[in-house]
Each structure stands twice: as C-alpha cells, then as structure tokens.
Image (cartoon, helix red, strand yellow):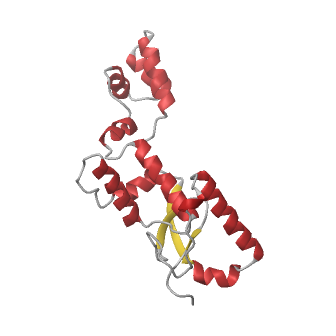
Amino acid sequence: MTLVHEDNIQSAVDAVRRGAKQREAAESFSVGQSTISGRIHGAVRKKEAKLASMRLSLEEERFLVEWCLSEEAARRPPSKARIKRIGEIILKEAGDFTPLGYRWPDRFLQRHTRVKTKKGVLLDTERKRGSTRAAYEDFYARLRHQINTKDIPPSRITNIDEHGMQEGETEAGTVIGDSLTPKALVTSSKGTT
C-alpha cells in the first residue's frame, strides 16, 4: 500500500471539479478513484476524522505538551501515568468523568513529537559530576526564565531546602520530556547519596 500525498488528492479533486473525468484525474495524480469520489462527496482526511473523536481538544493536548516541557525544565518530568491523570483532570473540569484509556499516553506521544519517553536520572547522582559554577549559573538562569515566563510575583516564591516537600515528585525511571534531549534530570527529595 503506497501513501498518497494530500496535495495529490486535492489536485485530483480540483481537476475533476474543473471538468476532468475521475479516472483521468486518478491516473494523472496517482490517486485512487474511490478516494477522489469520496472527497467530492464530503469525505474528510483520516487525520481530520480522528480529531473529531479525540477526548481532549488539540488545544488541550498542546497545553499538556507545554506542561510536560515546563515540568522537565523544573526537574520534575512527568510519567505516562501522570500525564494521563492531568488529562483526566482536564476532562473532569469539562464534565467528562470517563477515564482515559490505557493506551492514551502512547497515542498522545505519537501525535506530539516535541515530547517523548526517555530515561530519568536522579539529580543526586548527576550532582557529583556536575557541581560546577557553570551548572549553578545554568540553574539560576532557568529559574529566572520560569519566574519571568510564568509571571510569578515575589510573594509567591518560597525557599525550601532539597529535602523539603516537592509537589508531584517523580522518581528516576521512564519519564516524558523534550524529544531533543536524551535524558531528563529528576530532582529527588530523598536524602543525598
């Protein structure tokens, strides 16, 4: 089975609408005649048909992608189970209390290539190798970026030590983060090693 580019399909449909025979347009643009006929009679692309059946909107899923990237930047990359829970919270806010399916996180990752699963490495083990001035400068630059990007006022900033409580803590393992990096650093509030 060969994949037909959407531009070829649209060109074939346009040719038929200008008066060409379906069979001729199908041969000229290497498109199945039934595909042309279907499009002329209102059929939509498979991708568009799937969008209509998605539980979360594309906008909500894009928010989840940005949230995953933000969580990774804060050294709390989420697991598949965690993004599924966040997706279900979004649905509940809209009045939909049916849980997302078991395979939903995998399909979410297939739709959004900016994020992927990767190995999470505990920061405590990385700290031994990366406790340099440059590393600390990088940390504070990322912290400033998060504060500025999210417009966090000073009154909402709290200082707690590394053994303090971390909301949504993630242990090392398989996590979700930026698809351009090979691993994700994960902060641990368990004691240092």
State the image coordinates of residue 34 (x, y, percent, origin top left).
33, 27
Residue projecting furthest to the bottom: 193
The part of the image, by quadrant, that contains residue 50 is top left
Q: Quadrant of the N terminus?
A: top left
| Front residue of 44 and 73 | 73
The part of the image, by quadrant, that contains residue 49 is top left
Q: Quadrant of the C terminus?
A: bottom right
Residue projecting furthest to the right: 133
Q: Is residue 193 above or below residue 149?
A: below
Relative to 55, is 17 on the left or the right?
A: right
Q: Residue at x 35, y 20 (%)?
A: 40
Relative to 192, is 44 on the left or the right?
A: left
The answer to whether any part of residue 186 appears in the image is yes
Q: Is residue 63 above or below residue 138?
A: above
Q: Residue at x 30, y 61 (%)?
A: 102
| Front residue of 124 and 30 | 124
